[in-house]
């Protein structure tokens, strides 16, 4: 019988690697809370139409990469529903905003999420078919200030803070504007016309995109195509006065806050719902595919999904790529927490003491200590070897210790061995931890 393995494009995350994932998520939650973002959890699968209408039917995500299936009808009168594992989370958040009438409060809704997304693309380093994202959206009625350039700048400043607090050095914020939906449509036609003579000289993907989604040509990474792409018209030349004014205000706010950035006229993002501000944070340590996270403004997405006018801006970052960056040695050691060993390892000397050892471990855990519980079947030498690998101290519980109430505690760091009354053990461990 063949050994079962994880499906291609998926993987298991195991300790101690998950400790780094937890650290990233905890840091994100802490930073988001300071900016008044609350957590939202949307379903992992949605109606397929949600992504076709929001992401765009001609995008690679919808046309080639989604995991879609027909959900069987329960009765003959029911119609089978097409469902899709979410390939991104912004559409689901906006759908929830509409469904739960969050705009009726009149307040700006600041929402973040952490969870898996799914795309059937070629697996490679840092890119999987099931991948984890952290993202956030600031969305609301125009009266809430949702379309203010200040909102864009605040989100970008928050992301700069998050990367700094994660200890990621050397990031670059790339910034552009794709204008209003009318500006974008106008530029699409200008680009489509310019590509008529250029596309035949480009890669197969660009030849297809030149017809179906010209903006995606600007995302091409094929080296031979770069000179041709640089010769194409710039989107800035197609922007209206309002879009230019909005973008200038975003840039001015970032300058005032001291957030560094570079302007990238090719940064258009591949999803149809983006308008005005688009951005990416990149890092040189990730190679050619150097994006850490990206996002932008989507002022017409709510209306496209049948909801009220609700301008918004959001982003998504891939945890896999953040982890790669940190594991590559770019972690700021001053901001990185030390490797935390367990506070204590309880070693019962005999199987008849297992129950008493569990009681002791329960007392310490409820007092807030991280504790591992050994087993009375272990020889003392084996307990010491096991404890030394994962804990700062070993607490020995034999018949003598149980009867006298005086426990033997050995500190591996200091090399000391101390007799401690059981009633004082928690206080002893707390004092030792603070030294």
Image (cartoon, rainbow, N blue to C red):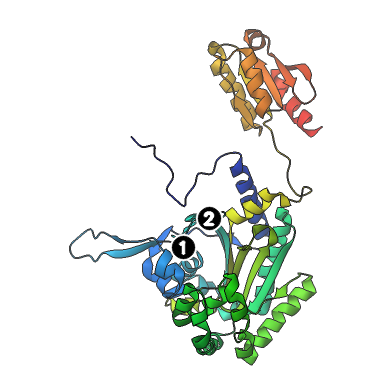
Q: Residue at x 30, y 65 (%)?
A: 81
The crowding category of the residue bearing disc 2, from other C-alpha atoms within 10 Å (few below 14, some 14 to 19, many at least 20), is few
Residue at x 63%, y 29% (from the top left corner)? 371
Crowd rating for badge 1 (residues with CA inside 10 Å; few <14, some 14–19, many 20+) = many
| Nearest to viewer (mark 2 / mark 1) | 2
Can the viewer see residue 219 in this picture? yes
Q: Residue at x 43, y 75 (%)?
A: 58
Q: Position of residue 237 (x, y in %)?
A: 63, 89
| Total numbered labels placed on residues in the image | 2
* Mark 2 element type: loop
Q: Is residue 338 left or right of residue 225?
A: right
The label number, if any, that marks residue 87 in the structure image? 1
Quadrant location, the N terminus? top left
Q: Is residue 209 above or below residue 282?
A: below
Looking at the picture, tell me which residue is in the foreground, 28 or 117.
Answer: 117
Is 65 above or below relative to 28? below
Which is nearer the N-term, disc 2 or disc 1? 1
Looking at the rendered structure, the secondary structure element under dot 1 is loop
Question: Measured from the top left, where is residue 199 in percent x and y?
Answer: 50, 82
Q: How far across and down, in percent of the image, does residue 246 sit?
A: 66, 84
Whole-angstrom CA distance, mark 2 to mark 1, is 17 Å
Disc number at residue 124? 2
Q: Which mark is residue 78?
A: none
Indicate the position of residue 222 as horizontal and vertical percent values.
Answer: 57, 70
Q: Residue furthest bottom?
A: 241
Question: Would you say 345 lies left or right of 167 here?
Answer: left
Q: Quadrant of the C terminus?
A: top right
Quarter where residue 287 is shown:
bottom right
Q: Nearer the viewer, residue 89 or 108?
A: 89
Residue 325's place in the image compared with 430, above or below, is below
């Amino acid at each position: 019988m063949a050994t079962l393995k994880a499906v291609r494009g998926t993987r298991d995350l195991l300790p101690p690697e998950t400790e780094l994932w937890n650290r990233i998520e905890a840091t994100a939650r802490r930073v988001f809370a300071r900016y008044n973002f609350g957590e939202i959890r949307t379903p992992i699968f949605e109606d397929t139409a949600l992504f076709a209408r929001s992401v765009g039917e001609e995008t690679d995500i919808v046309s080639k990469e989604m995991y879609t299936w027909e959900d069987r009808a329960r009765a003959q009168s029911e119609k089978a529903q097409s469902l899709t594992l979410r390939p991104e989370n912004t559409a689901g958040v906006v759908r929830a905003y509409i469904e739960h009438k969050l705009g009726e409060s009149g307040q700006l809704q600041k929402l973040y999420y952490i969870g898996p997304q799914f795309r059937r693309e070629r697996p490679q380093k840092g890119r999987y078919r099931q991948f984890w994202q952290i993202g956030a959206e600031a969305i609301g009625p125009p009266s809430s200030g949702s379309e203010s350039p200040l909102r864009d700048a605040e989100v970008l400043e928050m992301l700069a803070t998050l990367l700094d607090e994660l200890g990621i050095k050397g990031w670059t914020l790339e910034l552009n504007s794709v204008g209003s939906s009318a500006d974008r449509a106008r530029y699409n036609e200008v680009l489509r016309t310019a590509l008529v003579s250029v596309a035949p000289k480009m890669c197969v993907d660009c030849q297809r995109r030149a017809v179906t989604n010209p903006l995606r040509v600007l995302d091409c990474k094929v080296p031979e195509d770069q000179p041709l792409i640089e010769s194409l018209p710039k989107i800035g030349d197609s922007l209206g006065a309002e879009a230019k004014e909005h973008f200038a205000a975003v840039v001015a706010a970032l300058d005032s806050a001291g957030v560094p950035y570079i302007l990238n006229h090719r940064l258009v993002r591949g999803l149809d719902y983006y308008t005005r501000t688009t951005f990416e944070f990149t890092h040189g340590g990730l190679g050619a595919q150097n994006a850490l996270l990206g996002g932008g403004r989507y002022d017409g997405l709510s209306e496209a999904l049948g909801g009220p006018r609700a301008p918004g801006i959001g982003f998504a970052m891939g945890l896999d790529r953040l982890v790669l960056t940190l594991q590559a040695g770019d972690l700021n050691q001053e901001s990185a927490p030390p490797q935390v060993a367990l506070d204590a390892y309880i070693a019962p000397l005999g199987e008849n003491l297992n129950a008493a050892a569990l009681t002791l471990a329960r007392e310490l855990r409820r007092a807030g200590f991280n504790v591992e519980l050994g087993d009375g079947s272990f020889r003392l030498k084996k307990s010491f070897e096991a404890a030394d690998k994962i804990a700062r101290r070993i607490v020995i519980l034999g018949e003598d210790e149980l009867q006298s109430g005086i426990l033997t505690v050995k500190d591996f760091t200091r090399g000391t061995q101390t007799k401690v009354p059981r009633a004082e053990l928690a206080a002893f461990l707390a004092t030792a931890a603070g030294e």
